[in-house]
Amino acid sequence: MSVDGSGVLMEPGVAKSMPTTGGAGKPTQGQAGRRDTSVSNYVNELMQQVKAKNPAEPEFHQAVHEVAESLALVFEKHPEYRRKKVLERIIEPERVLLFRVPWMDDKGEVHVNRGFRIEMNSAIGPYKGGLRFHPTVNLGILKFLAFEQVFKNSLTTLPMGGGKGGSDFDPKGKSDNEVMRFCQAFMAELFRHIGPNTDVPAGDIGVGGREIGFLFGQYKKLRNEFTGVLTGKGLAWGGSLIRPEATGYGCTYFAANMLATRNQTLDGKTCLVSGSGNVAQYAVEKIAQLGGTIVTMSDSSGHIYDPEGIDAEKLRFVEELKNVRRGRIQEYTQKYRSATYTPVDPKLDHNPLWAHKADCAFPCATQNEINGADADHLLKNKVFVVSEGANMPSTPEAITKFVEAGILFGPGKAANAGGVAVSGLEMSQNSLRYNWTREEVDQRLLGIMKSIHDACVAASNRYGTTGNYVNGANIAGFLKVADAMLDQGIV
Ligand code: NDP
């Protein structure tokens, strides 16, 4: 069995293979034809074991498969990683915590949610990765996110291991008091397992500044200590300037770095952005600052299309709508008549947001939001830059199409690493008990995104797949963690 583009389990031979070789402007060819058969067999066997051991976790299978395909290039040259079973060890979380989160709503009714923390890998630093509060959260989704986080954190050049956590709690429609009681109940268990030198969670979908505040308050009360145990904190209590902006800014900087390889900039480019949360808002802000015109934003109910562009004033409206009033994106069209709203139609095999004409696409909502049909629409409309703000937003089928078309495709584990990079800088500032200025943090973020970009390019060149940022990110991210694991022995 294998995983198709939508995360559905399929019989052997049915699945499309992941992108392998190829680079900017060149037609791509599959790698399997010229790959050492023992390595091909190894990847196939590994995937069979992963699926047998982790049933009903299609997103986790998808994430592991993509990485294993890229690493086949490394294993051909360096069999020692296979002999020492480094990838097998990375796939198995160091620790998985699953706990009950009981809480009471405003009417006095009791609810029970499930809390999770996946401590995936600590070879190069304390576990680090966000918390997601969303009704779709389950073990498989958090394991895929934690697995991706290991490689992403390694790419940032900072000393951070990988983790992820969250709950199937849905903050939508809950009062501030209900969200506070839930966060306190969640932390009443999690506090035993985390700490500034052990595991440092942050935000993700459904966990923003409000939730981090409630979680931090409860941790501080239970531990009686003020430490940098969470990142994404408020500025007055240990937060870093630019942390809220970092993921959206970072994925825009990554796109700018990719464009620079073709002597181009974002100036004058038409851009599609999905989502309207933290990552999307700051991607829109930075794209507009760099001269791009953003024509779409969305939420899980639908998307808006504004051919006149979402400028700074319109973005302020979206921020107030989403962060303060917690309303739906449809309201944008009541305020700005130039825009149209298209609700999600579950009967469609594609997302019409990706069918608008543009040059660049920034998926900033959620996993598997660009499928094969969406990729066809993007390519037909001459989109030639895709920079992933979200984690794994493109299905394997979509990635194959992007890589084969030779467009500039920046995978999430590289393109959206700016968020965790500035989280790492927040940890450093907490340790120093010192705050850097906005300009200092932004300069460091710019520098980190450039080194991530260049590391991807160098690794993809070194392993003969020039222009393939998927291979570049997977290989560069893996090597640092793998070498640290070899140094530290079998633990
Ligand atoms: P937010 O909760 O702030 O925003 C998420 C946005 O995506 C909302 O507009 C939400 O709409 C939409 N969305 C969520 N689920 C779905 C869905 N199933 N279908 C369609 N739309 C959906 O989260 P973030 O902006 O923080 O995160 C967005 C993505 O970026 C995630 O993949 C996350 O893992 C990734 N990421 C985030 C980082 C960060 O620093 N925050 C760091 C690196 C990656 P609605 O409000 O209707 O739910």
Image: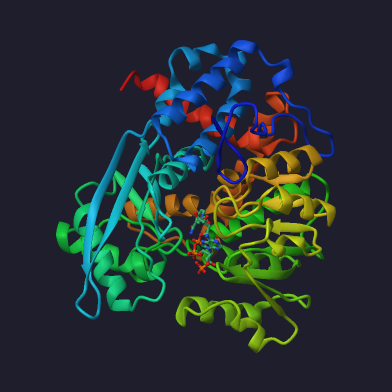
The image's colouring method is rainbow
In depth, the one of 307 and 354 nearer the eye is: 354
In depth, the one of 337 and 210 nearer the eye is: 337
Q: Residue 206, image x and y in percent?
A: 43, 64
Question: Looking at the image, is 340 positioned above or below residue 466?
Answer: below
Question: Looking at the image, is 188 positioned above or below residue 98?
Answer: below
Q: Residue 351, image x and y in percent?
A: 68, 60
In depth, the one of 419 and 54 nearer the eye is: 54
| Residue in the picture at 25% in, 75% down | 105
Question: Looking at the image, is 453 positioned above or below residue 335?
Answer: above
Quadrant in which the C terminus appears: top left
| In the displayed structure image, the side of residue 176 where residue 336 appears, left or right | right
Query: Would residue 340 be visible to someone looking at this image?
Result: yes
Query: Would residue 126 be visible to someone looking at this image?
Result: no
Quadrant in which the N terminus appears: top right
| Residue in the picture at 28% in, 63% down | 215
Query: In the figure, residue 350 lies in which quadrant?
Result: bottom right
| In the displayed structure image, the side of residue 168 where residue 263 appears, left or right | right
Query: In the figure, residue 328 lies in which quadrant?
Result: bottom right
Q: How many marks?
A: 0
Q: Residue 232, image x and y in percent?
A: 40, 61
| Residue in the picture at 84% in, 34% down | 26
Q: Residue 40, image x and y in percent?
A: 61, 17
